[in-house]
Amino acid sequence: MNTSQWHDALRELTGVTGVLGALIVSADDGLVVAETAMDELATADVAALAAAVVSRAGRCTDAMRAGVPSSLHLAAEQGALLAMAGPPPLWLVAVARHDAELGRLRLLLRDFAGALR
């Protein structure tokens, strides 16, 4: 997948009802690689949060000898952050409102994260 295809995939993710933004994030340093988001979404903050959660989840699953996580779902009162592992160190991340179509979003994230390889 090239950068143009990345942006097309991110645009499709943000086309899902309730999705505020979609990013490709480097889990190593918490930087945004590519993004499509609403203006009010602080994508740099989302990338930093996603990288921190991915890192912590990796340490937890390592301690449990449960393997490396391939997806994460961080739920909050007003929304959610969903992340799917792409080729290391990339993660595909979406931020959604509480009323978003999370099932559809999760399927698209899985498909596009696999295509990043």
Image (spheres, rainbow, N blue to C red):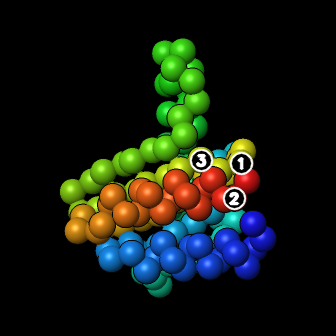
Which numbered disc flags the more N-terminal residue, 2 or 1? 1
Q: Amino acid at mark 2?
A: Leu
- Which residue occupies the foreground of this view, 110 or 88? 110
Q: Work out how far the residue at label 3 is from the one at label 1, CA to CA, in angstroms.
A: 7 Å
Q: Are marks 2 and 1 in contact (CB under 8 Å)?
A: yes
Give the x, y percent position of residue 3.
75, 73
Can see residue 30?
A: no
Q: Position of residue 81 (x, y in %)?
A: 40, 56
* Residue sitting at x 39%, y 75%: 16
| Residue underneath mark 1 | 87
Q: Separation of disc 2 and disc 3 at Cα?
A: 9 Å
* Classed neighbour count for the residue bearing mark 3: other residues with Cα under 10 Å, few (<14), some (14–19), many (≥20): many
Q: Is residue 80 visible?
A: yes
What amino acid is labelled 1 in the image? Pro
Alpha carbon distance from label 2 to label 1: 7 Å
| Amino acid type, residue under disc 3 in the picture | Ala
Quarter the N terminus occupies: bottom right
Q: Position of residue 100 (x, y in %)?
A: 29, 68
**Vertical arrangement, residue 62 with respect to residue 115, above or below:** above
Relative to 87, 9 lies left or right: left
Q: Residues within 10 Å of mark 2 (few under 14, many from 20)?
A: some
Q: Label 3: which residue?
A: 85
| Residue at which label 2 appears | 116
- Using the image as rendered, state which of residue 100 and residue 57 is in the foreground: 100
Q: Residue 21's spot in the image, x, y percent?
A: 47, 73
Q: Residue at x 54, y 40 (%)?
A: 70
Q: Is residue 60 above or below residue 90?
A: above
Q: Which mark is residue 112?
A: none
- Choose mark 2 or mark 3, whichever is in front: 2
